[in-house]
Image (cartoon, helix red, strand yellow):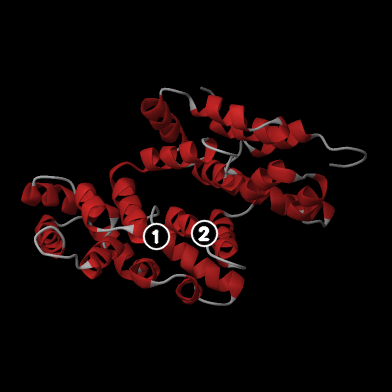
């Protein structure tokens, strides 16, 4: 970054091949060595979507996701899809860290901010997700319980298909409270009781934002990489590219399951994720994303 011009390729080579923990160590060493904030320096040297990718990589994951949550609720209107993407796809321990970080960064509880920006059953579901993390995290450690799973599956069946109208509250309560391992058992039991999947029931019984949110939970319990592959596909198709989604998903899943997302993408669409991203992006931005995707 020193002197005239910036060596973008070196920035890409160093930062896309390290873990987030290593990047935090680099940031600390940079401050120690030069007395400067590496993120501020990068911001002043870079621009556009390339800058977005690099800053996403340099921030601790929970802080980055909190910033994205805050951005999607600030100002006019709320981007509900971002709320779903971040809050309905993560495990209880991850949500607990986001809740704690949000309050530290913005000096207000995440639940309170969401309540002012959303409404109805959708708001109730998201609020339950962020307020029930303690219980859910404990359940996660305790492991799954098949007896409880059968009871919950029966409750879902009784609240939806078995009656006229739907009791969304039961769906919200069970899908927001239970750990992913427990939900997996519940969905299997549901199939035994009703003869088809919980996903089919949600699509038939529920609509609007709540349907999107509940479907995201179900799909992530069953196959999170496939859900994220669909999210990336939607971002690269149609008029214009949704760069925010591309950056956020690639940067936050890079150390988790990006390899699996690539495989699901190819399975679902018969095209590689790299070819679709390369077709929609250019320059350093494209090089950074492709570097994060890793070898084909």
In this view, 291 is above or below 163:
above
How packed is label 1: few (under 14 Cα within 10 Å), some, or many (20 or more)? some
Which disc, if any, is residue 93?
A: 1
Residue 120 as seen in the image, left or right of residue 77? left
Residue at the (81%, 56%) spot, across then down: 36
Among the 4 quarters of the image, the one containing residue 170 = bottom left
Percent of width and height locating residue 282: 68, 31
Judge depth for marks 1 and 2 and give the one in front.
2
Q: Quadrant of residue 269?
A: top left
Quarter of the image where the N terminus is located? top right
Mark number for residue 79?
A: 2
Image spot of residue 120 (x, y percent): 36, 72
Picture residue at 39% right of the left edge, 39% below the top: 225
Nearer to me, 189 or 295: 189
Near mark 2 (Cα within 10 A), the count class, few <14, some 14-19 or many ≥20, is some
Residue 126 showing in the rendered view = yes
Label 1 residue SS: helix
Q: CA distance from mark 1 to mark 2?
A: 24 Å
Secondary element under disc 2, as helix, strand or loop, is loop
Q: Is residue 249 above or below residue 134?
A: above
Identified at 45% across, 53% down, the residue is 85
Q: Is residue 291 left or right of residue 97?
A: right
Disc number for residue 278: none
Q: Is residue 182 left or right of residue 228?
A: left
Q: Quadrant of residue 92?
A: bottom left
Q: Residue 53, percent across and down?
A: 65, 44
| Marked residue nearer the N-terminal end (1 or 2) | 2
Q: Is residue 184 at least partly visible in the picture?
A: no
Residue 292 location (% of width, % of height): 58, 34
Q: Report the residue at 52% width, 59% height from top.
A: 79
Residue 149, above or below 250: below
């Amino acid at each position: 970054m020193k002197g005239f011009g910036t060596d973008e390729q070196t920035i890409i080579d160093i930062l896309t091949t390290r873990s987030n923990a290593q990047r935090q160590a680099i940031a600390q060493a940079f401050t120690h060595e030069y007395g400067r904030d590496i993120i501020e320096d990068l911001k002043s040297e870079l621009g556009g979507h390339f800058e977005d990718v690099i800053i996403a990589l340099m921030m601790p994951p929970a802080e980055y996701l909190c910033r994205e949550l805050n951005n999607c609720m600030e100002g006019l209107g709320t981007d509900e899809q971002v709320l779903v993407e971040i809050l309905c796809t993560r495990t209880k321990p991850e949500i607990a860290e986001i809740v704690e970080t949000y309050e530290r960064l913005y000096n207000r509880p995440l639940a309170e901010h969401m309540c002012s920006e959303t409404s109805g059953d959708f708001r109730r579901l998201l609020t339950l997700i962020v307020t029930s993390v303690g219980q859910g995290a404990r359940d996660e450690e305790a492991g799954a319980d098949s007896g409880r799973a059968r009871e919950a599956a029966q409750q879902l069946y009784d609240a939806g298909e078995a009656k006229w109208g739907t009791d969304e509250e039961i769906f919200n309560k069970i899908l927001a409270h239970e750990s992913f391992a427990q939900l997996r058992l519940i969905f299997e039991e549901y199939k035994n009781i009703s003869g088809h999947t919980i996903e089919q029931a949600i699509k038939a019984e529920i609509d609007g934002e709540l349907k999107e949110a509940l479907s995201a939970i179900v799909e992530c319990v069953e196959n999170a990489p496939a859900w994220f592959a669909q999210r990336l596909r939607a971002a690269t198709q149609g008029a214009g590219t949704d760069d925010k989604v591309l950056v956020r998903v690639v940067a936050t899943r890079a150390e988790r399951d990006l390899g699996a997302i690539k495989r699901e993408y190819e399975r679902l669409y018969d095209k590689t994720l790299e070819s679709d991203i390369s077709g929609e992006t250019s320059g350093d931005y494209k090089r950074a994303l492709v570097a994060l995707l890793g070898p084909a």
